[in-house]
Amino acid sequence: EVLLVESGGGLVQPGGSLRLSCAASGFTFNDFEMNWVRQAPGRGLEWVSYIRGSGNTIYYADSVKGRFSISRDNAKKSLYLQMNSLRAEDTAVYYCARVWHGVAGQYDYWGQGTLVTVSS
Amino acid sequence: SYVLTQPPSVSLAPGQTARMTCGGNSIGSKSVHWYQQKPGQAPVLVVYDGRDRPSGIPERFSGSNSGNTATLIITRVEAGDEADYFCQVWDSTSEHVVFGGGTKLTVL
């Protein structure tokens, strides 16, 4: 069974940092591209970042470029999102999602999400 | 940047057919994916590559994609289909994934 479990969310002050993790199981992690997607309270889905299985190709949404950094540890079957210079508008539930083969592929499995709240 | 436009809401009675659109420039040339999201839950893939269904998704769910409009179709709508539905594509020009704003399906 494919499982994605996010962790690391919480309350952080504006300008602060947070590192999210996504633990994967039930599939060959390094064979799959992964994404972070977020959803602000009461809002729609917003793509955050993409990383190829090997980690050698990465894309970011304009809203987070230069502040967030995606990475992965295939040996630990884990995906990460380092978030720096956090703003109130980064408040959201953050989901990790597996991509079914190819950057244009569908997201066939999602985690349950972890809530990040940026507030003083 | 590439924009996907979805109507905010669709309402219909049980048993009717829901057609939810997703508009984008030449979207017919892209792979479009659709997700269902119920309150408090993670999104679930219901249609991929415009018209294909993942295993476990009822045959009532289908899709089409041509020109500037992709459509998610749900036949014989049930109360359990009430949810938000989002379309998604990859824009190779901007190297960004794009989600539509979502359509809230209400079953009266």
Image (cartoon, rainbow, N blue to C red):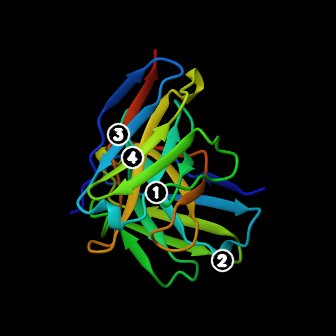
Label 2 vs 3, first from the N-terminus: 2
Residue beneath disc 1: B50
Q: Nearer the viewer, residue A58 or A13?
A: A58
Amino acid type, mark 4: Thr
Amino acid type, mark 2: Asn
Residue beneath disc 4: B71
Q: Position of residue A40 (x, y in %)?
A: 38, 41
Per the rendering, the mark at residue A56 is: none
Q: CA distance from mark 1 to mark 2?
A: 27 Å
| CB-based contact (under 8 Å), mark 3 and mark 1 | no
**Helix, strand or loop under label 2:** helix
Amino acid type, mark 3: Ser
| CB-based contact (under 8 Å), mark 4 and mark 3 | no
Q: CA distance from mark 4 to mark 3?
A: 39 Å
Residue at 46% in and 64% down:
A82
Q: Nearer the viewer, residue A118 or A24?
A: A24
Q: Position of residue B17 (x, y in %)?
A: 47, 30
Residue beneath disc 2: A30
| Number of the front mark, 2 or 4 | 4
Would residue B75 be found to the left or right of residue B97 on screen? right
Residue at 46% in and 40% down:
B73
Q: Nearer the viewer, residue A80 or B69?
A: B69
| CB-based contact (under 8 Å), mark 1 and mark 2 | no
Query: Is residue B18 something that shows in the picture?
Result: yes
Residue at 74% in and 62% down:
A25
Displayed quadrant of residue B58: top right
Q: CA distance from mark 2 to mark 3?
A: 35 Å
Q: Nearer the viewer, residue A26 or A73?
A: A26
Amino acid type, mark 1: Gly
Label 4 vs 1, first from the N-terminus: 1
Per the rendering, the mark at residue A119 is: 3
